[in-house]
Amino acid sequence: MRNLLGVLILAVAVFPVSAADGPIPWAYAIPPAPPAGSPPAAPAAPDTSVKHLDGSNGAFTRAQIADRFGPADWYPGDHPPMPDVVAHGKKPDVWACGLCHYPNGKGRQENAGVAGLPIAYFIQTMYDFRNGARKSAEPRKNNTNLMVQFAKNMTDEEIKAAAEYFGSMKWTPWIKVIETNTVPKTHNSNGMFLVEGNEKEPLGKRILETPENAEATEVLRDPHSGFFAYVPPGSIKRGEALVTKASSKTTQCGLCHGADLKGLGPVPGIAGRSPSYLMRQMYDMKQGTRNGTWTQLMKPVVANLSDEDMLDIVAYTASRTP
């Protein structure tokens, strides 16, 4: 028992739910800075081999897969025809939406899943980026900074086309939530936590969101390869109580997001979506860096929530079937 208690104390110390000097590390996943004085890493030799995925007729090099203005579309039969801004962006200041969010709108832990978002909500969000109403509490969160740039350089027609395209597709299961005390050891690669071997470590008071297959996600940008979200034992049950029952701390989520948390009118669904993303949004709203029309409804909801409460809430919402 004494050894177990020591492990638990170590876990809490090493993996706090938040940091006193900034936003929640596991949610924002800012890559660590190189040691002071270290020389810049030598660029790796370009990988010019042709890549393939099961079930796809596509054949792409790494450069084609990561092309900011025309990334690989592995499964064109999965989605409607893409508007030009989704497929190619607009040089030089607007990357293709399909690069980061995938052509099917699923996205990854470092950005956002946009499939199934209400059209009005999507458009308003882009206007909030454009007008300075939506920023990250973590200024190093480059995805948010890029979205501000993109929104400022997109026309209203391009924003509407992207909103209608992603809004036409339903959000379907993408993240498998697992309650556990120990998790695979990972390293941070461009804002994603990737499994680096067979070692295990304590989860502590955090959520670890990581690709099911690191190579498929990081190298191939496979839009069929989803994510695991490892959450602390008991967090789903605690989150359910906060989400579904009236309390002095917060408002029941279903009042706005629908009883099944799949959305209600212009309010987006939150069931089965990235817990890292939802944690960032609640934290940004609480800190006052995310504002805008819809945010005003959320500010009183998050005002009295601790970081631990928000962790439990997103563990529960991520576990729900969309």
Image (cartoon, rainbow, N blue to C red):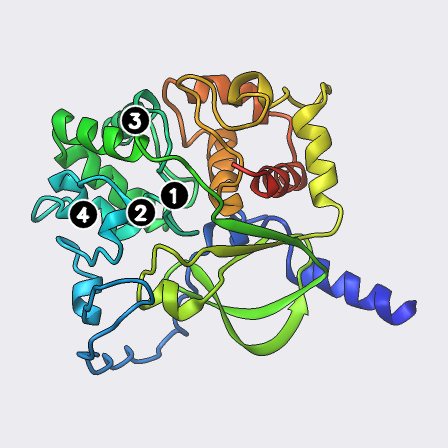
What residue appears at the point 31 percent right and 20 percent down from the top-left corner? 120
Q: Which residue is mark 2?
A: 101
Residue type pointed to by label 3? Asp
Of labels 1 and 3, the one closer to you? 1
Evaluate whether residue 244 shows in this view: yes
Whichever of labels 4 and 3 marks the residue nearer the N terminus, that label is 4
Real-space Cα distance between discs 1 and 2? Answer: 7 Å
Whichever of labels 4 and 1 marks the residue nearer the N terminus, that label is 4
Whichever of labels 1 and 3 marks the residue nearer the N terminus, that label is 1
Real-space Cα distance between discs 1 and 3? Answer: 16 Å
Whichever of labels 2 and 4 marks the residue nearer the N terminus, that label is 4
Q: Which type of secondary structure does the marked residue at label 1 adopt?
A: loop
- Residue 157: give x, y in percent of width and height: 13, 26
What residue appears at the point 9 percent right and 44 percent down from the top-left corner? 90
Residue 123's disc is: none
Q: Which residue is mark 1?
A: 112
Residue type pointed to by label 1? Ala
Evaluate whether residue 23 shows in this view: no
Real-space Cα distance between discs 4 and 3? Answer: 20 Å
Location of residue 67 with respect to 294 vertically, above or below: below
Residue 128's disc is: 3
What residue appears at the point 7 percent right and 48 percent down from the top-left corner? 91
- Residue 179: give x, y in percent of width and height: 69, 53
Location of residue 238 with respect to 257 vertically, above or below: below
Of labels 4 and 3, the one closer to you? 4
Rate crowding at label 4 as few (under 14), some (14 to 19) or many (20 or more) other CA atoms within 10 Å.
Answer: many
Contact check, label 1 and label 2, Cβ < 8 Å: yes
Whichever of labels 2 and 3 marks the residue nearer the N terminus, that label is 2
Residue 96's disc is: 4
Q: Quadrant of residue 56?
A: bottom left
Residue type pointed to by label 4? Ala
